[in-house]
Image: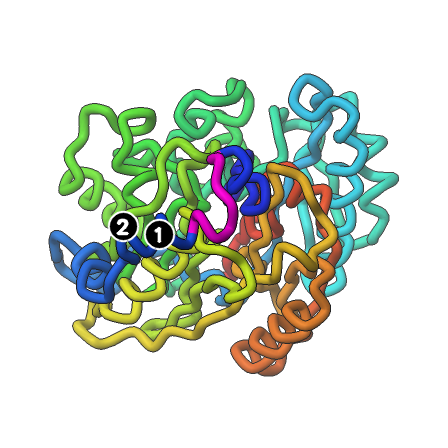
Amino acid sequence: MSSPHRLDRRRFLTAAGLTAAGLAVTAASAGPATAATAATAGRPRTRTRSPRAGAMTVPIDSAPHTRTWMAWPDSTAIYGRKLSGMQANIALIANSIAQYEPVFVLANSASVSAARRACSNSNVTVIGSIPVDDCWMRDSGPVFRTDGAGGLDAVGLNFNGWGNKQTHAKDALVAQRVAAYLGITFTAAGLVSEGGAIETDGAGTLMATSSSIVNPNRNPNLTQSQIEQAMCAAYGASEVIWFTGISGQDITDDHVDATSRFLAPGGGLVQTPNPADPPDIWSNDEQQQYNALSSATDALGGPISVTALQSPDYNLIRATSVNFVDSYANYYVCNGAVISAQFGDSSADANARSVLRSLFPGRTVVQLNIDNLGNQGGGIHCVTQQQPAV
């Protein structure tokens, strides 16, 4: 889940009692985040050794996959009358990915038949033996690691419902149950987090927002240094690039995968503000992350080349929900394709397609209308978890 339950920009202005002009004045008075400030926030506080040869590491998302893992939502307590729309979007994503690689969907036993009817592609397998609370597999699912020599294991990030904000008794066990289903070694990480909160380049560098992880609702008894060490141990990494992020405005406390992604060692992508939208806390966060990543160095000491991917214009997208997340950056890379969102701003949608095509040559860019998912605060990356090939 990327940034669920965030207040969208149009209604943020009203809720804050500000007109667009008033917000611009306030922002100008406070001063935007400067490149120097962003660079300082983005540089790692600690540096440790690079992963040993043969050590277990989490590959970058775009490495070849064995399959994609997803989960089927069936809780009216969570979604009410919006449940059918969520299920339709999950099925759309599963069926789209299944054109390129196998998809395994976890479903509660009572929902297996419905999930199988909706996920009709023959490359989708529905599993009814691992119960779930919700569908955000990026956050509750296992983080898979490989050793480059045919080895595969899984790490669990001790999912606690995004800081105990939602019921999660079943989801807290999903990671270890998937590992048991596959018959692979499972290890619990030394911190509480979610997969959407941590990006890896697969070569020793991580990035994350401190608002999401260095937060008493996840890790009340750990210092930032201790959290970094636990992250690096879990991912087989040696360096963390921190963004400040935003606390308390959405259920995830600002997951990094809604804004910033690694493309390769030494390469990243950041979703940046649309100039047609007035500045707010979210656009300022996007700009801060872009400045910080552009000024950071990776685990090998080299600079990171950053591609900007412009947000859509909030006045031109289809959705108007206060919970809507307009993240192009929350795409999912599978074997042979990039599964991305489109929001109804035809110019911005076309630009996103063009940028992703240029960044992932040889892969088909598939743009989907996932507005029901976006209305619940998430995106395509949020509901998927890749199992890397070994």
Give residue 33's quadrant in the image. Answer: bottom left
Between 30 and 191, the one nearer to me in the picture? 30
**Residue at left offset 78%, top offset 37%:** 85
Highlighted magenta segment, given as a residue range: 16-23
Q: Could you tell me if the residues under marks 1 and 2 are in contact, i.e. CB atoms within 8 Å?
A: yes
Using the numbered discs, state the Cα–Cα distance from disc 1 to disc 2 in whole angstroms. 5 Å
Residue 222 spot, x, y in % from top left: 18, 30
Decide whether residue 185 is among the magenta residues: no
Give residue 363's quadrant in the image. Answer: bottom right
Q: Amino acid at mark 1?
A: Ala
Q: Which residue is mark 2?
A: 30
From where the camera sits, is residue 342 visible?
A: yes
Residue 52 to residue 252: above or below: below
Residue 145 to residue 215: above or below: below
**Residue 57, which numbered label?**
none
- Dot 1 lies on which element? helix
Residue 310 spot, x, y in % from top left: 52, 68
Task: Say left or right for 210 vs 301.
Answer: right
**Residue 27, which numbered label?**
1
Residue 362 to residue 154: above or below: below
**Residue at left offset 49%, top offset 56%:** 278
Residue 211 spot, x, y in % from top left: 31, 39
Task: Say left or right for 287 vs 14.
Answer: left
**For the image shown, how many numbered marks are present on the structure?**
2
